[in-house]
Image: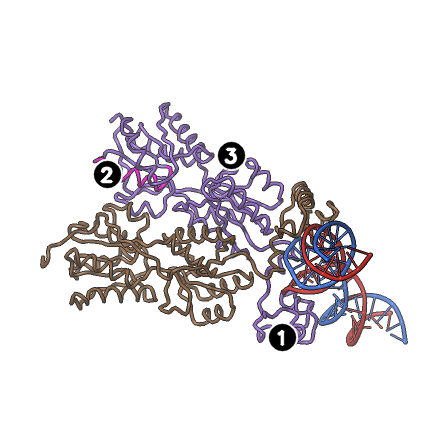
Chain colours: A brown, B purple, C blue, D red
Amino acid sequence: MKPTIKDIAAESGVSIATVSRVLSHKTGTYSEKTQAKILAVAKRLGYRKNSTAVELVKKKAAVIALIINATPTNFSTQIIDGIQRRASELGQGVIILYAGNRNAELQHQAIVTALERAVSGILLAAIEPDAEDLTLLKESHVPFCFVSVYLGTDKVLSVSSDNEKLAATTTDYLLDHGHTRIGLAGVDTYHTGSQRIAGYQRALAARGIQETTIKYGDYSYESGRQLLAEFLPLKVTAIIAASDMVAAGLLNAAQEAGIAVPEQLSLVSIDGTDICRITTPALTSLTQDFYQIGAQSVDRVMGEKAATFVPVEMVERDSVKSVSRGG
Amino acid sequence: MKPTIKDIAAESGVSIATVSRVLSHKTGTYSEKTQAKILAVAKRLGYRKNSTAVELVKKKAAVIALIINATPTNFSTQIIDGIQRRASELGQGVIILYAGNRNAELQHQAIVTALERAVSGILLAAIEPDAEDLTLLKESHVPFCFVSVYLGTDKVLSVSSDNEKLAATTTDYLLDHGHTRIGLAGVDTYHTGSQRIAGYQRALAARGIQETTIKYGDYSYESGRQLLAEFLPLKVTAIIAASDMVAAGLLNAAQEAGIAVPEQLSLVSIDGTDICRITTPALTSLTQDFYQIGAQSVDRVMGEKAATFVPVEMVERDSVKSVSRGG
DNA sequence: ATAGGCATTGTAAACGTTTACGTAACGTGC
DNA sequence: GCACGTTACGTAAACGTTTACAATGCCTAT
């Protein structure tokens, strides 16, 4: 049987209270002599604390729940990495709960599971909540934070890139390189997609361009492959891809169709993961700092100082060509 | 305050024992009438069970701990996905603990944390344990299983590809395409690397080839980029890359050096993730079934039937050229 | 009528901690 | 020598469940 503080108490001739105080470092409440004695006995017995019991009496688990879509995006590892490290620094464990694929039922279930465990915070990565979930979360009084999704309000905690600004920056970049017929590929119809569309349209409008070319998708490689054909008749000279995978799909489809990138078609990708370095040509990208997004969301949910928007960075590689104005 | 079974009991005029029985579906121990009454009250009060309390009294958490290296390999999401789904089917949650980067201290800490939580099983993904950890795990009497690592013995549970056979198959594939000067790039010096080297050497020896060309690395893109230069003087016509990322590194370095793939150099990658489809040319790969590796490791650790080795598959794409014998 | 069995419920202990409160011993200052 | 403070420790309740065991009432067979 696993030894408990009771065993240590018996063995060292003190009460369990004293053992508990020593083992949980309540300094100033015990003598050095007893400390040494108890520590020695604990070690000899191979004692290991029972977190469950601690959590029960403290009514809080030192654990952050991360709810995430089952379809693993290529950046989720970076987010998880950031969350894990920062959580670890704050003495928190991380429990990951999958929410299926935009499956409302599973999503709800994941939140309930997190609540049942009395976690210290809930992180929702790339999840668009429905009204019921939002109510459930609010009423639970457990702090929660959306990760890589901004609901357009500051009433709810979230950490992400500023999607609107990000799309505007990318559009401006292409405009500055002389492109005027610019497409936007693979965005969805939820918050993230809408914000990017807004930024894209705003940047174009600022230069007097009303005409926009938006093709919806699901951020996947397949999505990019399929979408290329839809852009061809529209004579765009550049496309902004909503994700690295979409960009890779567009790129490969273009190459198969005999369209040279960047000579005949420029491509900028939003995300900037390793994927961009691997393709030929390497993809110029508006790179998001997913590690920071993860790390700061932990700060957010634990009540530490953190920004809502994490800075992005334009990384130039080989998929964009400058065109002469009016060319 | 969150309602407990005590509140429900008071509200519906029964004892907490009855409430517990109804809520945990101990069918046959309560009447339909009481069940209906209790369920109604529970719902009205917004009752949610306290998993911590349940775990304490049951002395087991319905949770599997997954210990994983901090460096996220590009296949870890697939493994995690497999683990998560199968665990969910078996009614288990998943708690992920990062073990740093081959950091013995953190690795040890992660195991201790898992033990403190009284998890129902421990999964160690892509982790090579030291002797102390192995002892700790064995003495804990918590079932544990290595994932994507085979320690070369059946005394310890593990689920992975058969690395030796996998390397032999890949080598045979290149031999069958007429290659005789075949390199092996990016393997490590631990179990996985050694097993692959053994398979590679065995396959070559079977055809009377004693000369081998092995370059060690760490499975990364950078590793692949650097290694190419070391192969050039050796006049190999084909290289087996220890991972997709190594293959991508080799490929891009080759393209920069003006070496055409597959015309002047053939490449086969071990792993077969999405990366292989994205590069130009697409990489022929010995594809591992990481999802299954994850899923079966859960079965393993939960005492269900599962195989140690998960089948692999040769997927032909565009990075291998046939050469005429003696050419 | 009575014993026995069954269905249903209650009582209370247990799980392994933390911690409020009480207390004993031992100065210390007067 | 006494009040008082401090240090070190013990007692016991509490956290929210599960479950062994006991108890009750009712039904049935004799």
Which amino acid, by three-letter code, is at mark 3?
Gly
Give the mark, 1 or 3, whose residue is nearer the N terminus. 1
- Counting from the top left corner in percent of width and height, residue B174 is at 33, 33
User: Which circle's residue, 1 or 2, is located before the other in the chain?
Assistant: 1
Magenta span dominant secondary structure:
helix
Q: Which chain does the residue under circle 2 lie in? A: B
- Nearest the viewer among A147 and A102 is A147
Magenta-colored stretch includes residue A75: no
Q: Secondary structure at mark 1?
A: helix
Near-viewer residue (D9 or A318)? D9
Give the chain letter at badge 3: B
Q: Secondary structure at mark 2?
A: helix
Q: Name the quadrant of the C terminus of chain A.
A: bottom left
Q: Amino acid at mark 1?
A: Ala
Residue topped by disc 3: B152
**Residue B243: within the magenta?**
yes
Q: Residue A69 at what x, y percent from top left?
A: 42, 59
Res. A268 visible in picture: yes
How far, Cα to Cα, is label 1 from label 2? Answer: 71 Å
- How far apart in space, not on screen, are marks 3 and 2 (Cα)? 38 Å
- Residue drawn where x is 73% and y is 49% of the image: A14
Residue A4, which numbered label?
none
Q: Cβ–Cβ below 8 Å for labels 1 and 3?
A: no
- What's the residue at 29%, 26% (across, down)? B234
Identify residue for label 1.
B36
Residue B67 position in % (x across, y down): 50, 46
Task: Classify residue B270 by image quadrant.
Answer: top left
Q: Which residues are magenta?
A: B242-257
Residue B255 disc label: 2
Q: How many marks?
A: 3
User: Is residue A230 among what the camera can see?
Assistant: no
